[in-house]
Amino acid sequence: MTPDEFNALCINDLRDAKIDGRVAIVGSGPSAPYIPPIEDLSKQLCVRCGIDWPPKEYFWALAERAYLSNSSEYFKVIRETYDKTPHWQARIYKHIARLPVQGWATFNYDEQLPEACFEIPGKLEKNDFSVFPAVGNDTYASPQEFFGSRQKLVALHGYCDERNPEWEKQIILRTSDYNKHYIDNPASLSIWWREMLLTAPCIFLGTSLKEPGLHRAIEYLKTEHLDRLIAMNHIHLLDNQPDPNTKKYSTPGTSLLVIRQIHFDRIDDRYSGLMKILSEFSGLSIDRPMPGCVGPEPIKPTDSFPLYPL
């Protein structure tokens, strides 16, 4: 099976899954390489906060140690990483913003997805975009609101809001941040995910689902509402590369034992395969603009060049 044939199956599976009735859960994958990867952020935290980087340590644990070692430098690194993003955007967000979904929930702190949504006339109004943790009198979208008359966008783990001088202190990144919002009473995000995952079918994009808060929320729901969780038919879009020897693709399984996987072949490091798949639903072309200015015709020996009266 060729990559194009494999991706055609992915498109058919997504159509059958009716993504127009789903909520898109967007991870950090589409932001690369415009946002520094976790590996680069980890190195910066180690240098600036004076800690080592043990092999196989989870990032949220490293971030906790960096904070405890030098909280001032920790917050400076976070602000510098996400506040000074380039003034350009990953093209894939233009497609994600135009997917016929009920809305978007993102784990990202950067502005790429919100910008892509707001640049579409009439797509979102100011009140359609919200952030958790909410600050002051602000609020954030509940799962039920995603099935209202307008699409919603919520940044679930904070956002680099230039109006908020302390946004870097409120994002969810360290182990203690996750415990505060997912575990400790009132565990607001666990409640949010309970409502979302048991009432709204989701499609997970650009995430490995190794995110600790969501992972713990799903593990808990599996013990209490396994049948309902499976019945929602959530889907997880994942890259699948053929075996280098057999040239065959592995069979899609389930993520966390309850979320159906749909596989695609990225084709290259630019994820051209995924762009093609999303373009089938966004309505946008992935072709580069072609120059169309036609020059004069070549002069032939038979041309007479008649004189025209002035």
Image: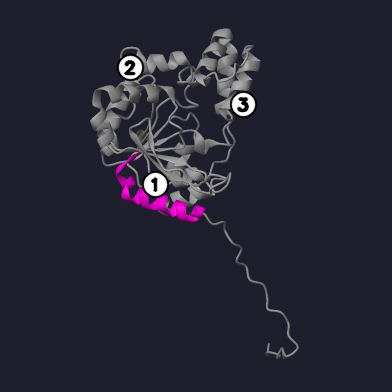
Residue located beneath label 2 in the image: 187
Secondary structure at badge 2 equals: loop
Q: Are marks 1 and 3 in contact (CB under 8 Å)?
A: no
Residue located beneath label 3 in the image: 40
- Give the farthest residue toward the top: 69
Q: Amino acid at mark 2?
A: Ala
Residue 31 locus on image (x, y percent):
52, 36
The magenta stretch is: 1-23
Residue 226 against residue 32 in the figure, above or below: above
Horizontal arrangement in the rendering, residue 152 relative to residue 45 (left or right): left
Which picture quadrant has residue 50?
A: top right
Residue 245 locus on image (x, y percent):
57, 46
Q: Residue at x 48, y 28 (%)?
A: 109
Q: Nearer the viewer, mark 1 or mark 3?
A: 3
Q: Residue at x 36, y 49 (%)?
A: 13
Residue 11 part of the magenta segment: yes
Earlier residue among tags 3 and 2: 3
Q: Amino acid at mark 3?
A: Asp
Earlier residue among tags 2 and 1: 1
Give 125 or 286, whichever is nearer the viewer: 286
Secondary structure at badge 1 equals: loop
Residue 13 against residue 29 in the figure, above or below: below
Could you tell me what secondary structure mostly forms the magenta stretch? helix
- Give the farthest residue toward the right: 301
Q: Which mark is residue 99?
A: 1
Q: Residue at x 30, y 14 (%)?
A: 186
Q: Which mark is residue 252?
A: none
